[in-house]
Every structure is written in structure tokens, then in C-alpha cells.
Amino acid sequence: MPITQIAGEPCRNGDVMQRDAREEVVAMSGVVTRFGHHVVHDGIDLVVLRGEIMGLVGGSGSGKTTLLRHMIGLTVPTAGSIRLFGKPMHGMQGANLHQRFGVCFQGGALFSALTVAENIALPLRELRILDGALIQQLVAVKLAMAGLEAQDGLKLPAELSGGMIKRAALARALALDPELLFLDEPTAGLDPIAADHFVALLRSLHSQLELTVVMITHDLDTLVDICDRIAVLADKRLIALGTLDEVSAVSHPFIKSFFHGPRAERLLRARSLASS
């Protein structure tokens, strides 16, 4: 089944849709992932444009986090290529790209023995070009950007609520002023109010900092509220790519269960009423 039509690809009538002129910040081509005889991805093509928020969804075991790990250079795909900002992610040039993106891992992945401030300062210290006083000032700025108080920086991760852990991890991800932000299930484990606040924070930071965002999420509210386009991963490939309306119109069992279940129908109906 072909994925949803996207700009720049041939239409069925032979015409060509106008390609978005924005920079391709992430470009994946023919990505294959195998673990022994187990194939996780079989020819993934995905482009993320500058300034957009791309949501990546898929069922459990579909390889969402594995794909994210390829994008940030933690693992190398079996075949295919991944380029960030036009440069190969894997290889000598990839080492120079890490300061241009930040990562907010699922669960925060904060170092438990370090305070929040020390966690945020860590990527700054690794640059080895900033003095201690400037690092402290930058940490204070990042805390405020993430909606945390100065005293929160003195706490250990074990002393934080779930929402505060997400914000602290976000502050660390923003420490080096990245252009690109990767998020793995950013609202997982949060109550609805905390999730709404975190999504509002992301929306504000995206606008203020002109970020490009790639976000793994299974949360429909987040997809509806913040994502410009959605990529759906199933059957070892992308089965749909486009806006929420475009993706939800694709005929596939996973899309039917995810976007057209009772809860999803209520949410999409409310969205339609709110926009009318």
C-alpha cells in the first residue's frame, strides 16, 4: 500500500506536486534494520523539513525508538542512509552534528547522582570552552526556559515529580541551543493536566526558538495539538505520511484502530467542532 501523497512526488495523473522549499533537516533513504534474521525496517524513506513538528507513531515493536536511535547516531542501520542538515549522520561528518540537535529520552534519562543543574550543565562542560560562571548562567536560563525554578536545579532526579523530570530533561536537551529536537514519548506517564502543560511548553519553545522537532508519541492529544505532519510506522515500513487528516484517511488496520477507535473518534470530532 503506498504511503499518503506528499509534496514533490508524482501524482497518479502524472503531474508533480510543488515541493516544499524548506531545508531537509532529516533525510532518511532506504533505511533497513535487521537483528539477525529479524527485519525491523525494510526501506524507510522519511524527510523532516526545517521548522516542522513531525510525529512518529506505530504499534508496539514497530521500531519507532530504533529508528530514532539511528537518527541520532547511537546505532547504524543495516542499509540505507541518514543525513542531518545535508550531512551523513554516520561517519566522520556525523561527529560534528551532535551539537546541532538535542534529545529528550523517554523517562528523562537524567543521571541520578547529579542534581538537575549538574545534569543540564553536563553537555556544556563537555565543550571544554566555557568557564564555570558562564555555565551557571546558562543553566539558569535553561531552567527558566523549561518552566523550572532556580531552586529546582538543586534537587536530585529522585526528588522530582514526573512532570518536573520531563522539564529537566528538556532543559538538558536544549543546553547547546540546538536547531533540531528529538523527543521520545514526551508526555508518557503524565496526567492530562501535566501533559497539556508540557505540550503548551513545547509549542511555545518551538515558536520562540524556531526548532525542528521529531517526536515519537502514541498520545492522540499531542498529535492533534502540536504535530504538523505524522509518519505512521507499521509492517516494517512507513504506511502513511502527511497531515492528521491525510493520514487518518489511509486504509490500513493499524490506522483504523489508532485513528478511528472510540476515543480517537471523540477527539477528532471535538477538533472538527472547535475548528468550525
Image: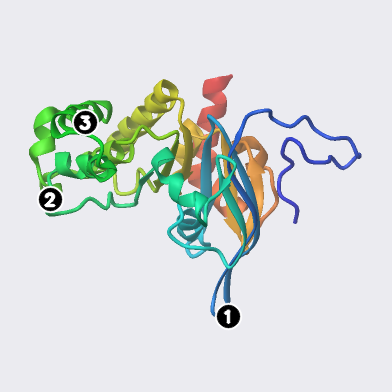
Q: Nearer the viewer, mark 1 or mark 2?
A: 1
Check residue 143 in the rendering and tell me which mark sits there, or answer none: 3
Q: Residue drawn 64% across and 36% down?
A: 245
Q: What is the C-alpha distance between the residues marked 3 and 1?
A: 45 Å
Which amino acid type is shown beneath numbered disc 3?
Leu
Residue 3 or residue 72, whichever sits in front = 72
Secondary structure under the numbered disc 2 in the rendered image:
helix
Give me the disc on residue 37: 1
Q: Residues within 10 Å of mark 3 (few under 14, many from 20)?
A: many
The answer to which of 140 and 63 lies nearer the viewer is: 140
Image quadrant of residue 47?
top right
Query: Which of pointers 1 and 2 lies earlier in the amino acid sequence?
Result: 1
Q: Report the residue that reaches farthest toward the right.
A: 13
Alpha carbon separation for disc pair 2 and 3:
17 Å
> Do the residues bearing badges 2 and 3 touch, measured as CB atoms within 8 Å?
no
Looking at the image, is 259 positioned above or below residue 267? below
Judge the density around disc 1: few (<14), some (14-19), many (≥20) Cα neighbours within 10 Å. Answer: few
Badge 2 amino acid: Ala
**Image-based side of 266 in relation to 171, left or right:** right
Q: Which residue is mark 2?
A: 158
What percent of the width, then of the height, locates residue 91? 52, 57
Q: Secondary structure at mark 3?
A: helix
Of label 3 and label 1, which has the lower sequence position?
Answer: 1
Residue 97 is situated, as x and y percent measured from the top left of the image, at 46, 44
x then y, percent, for residue 273: 55, 24
Picture residue at 67% right of the left edge, 38% below the top: 246
The answer to whether one can see residue 53 in this image is yes
Q: Amino acid at mark 1?
A: His
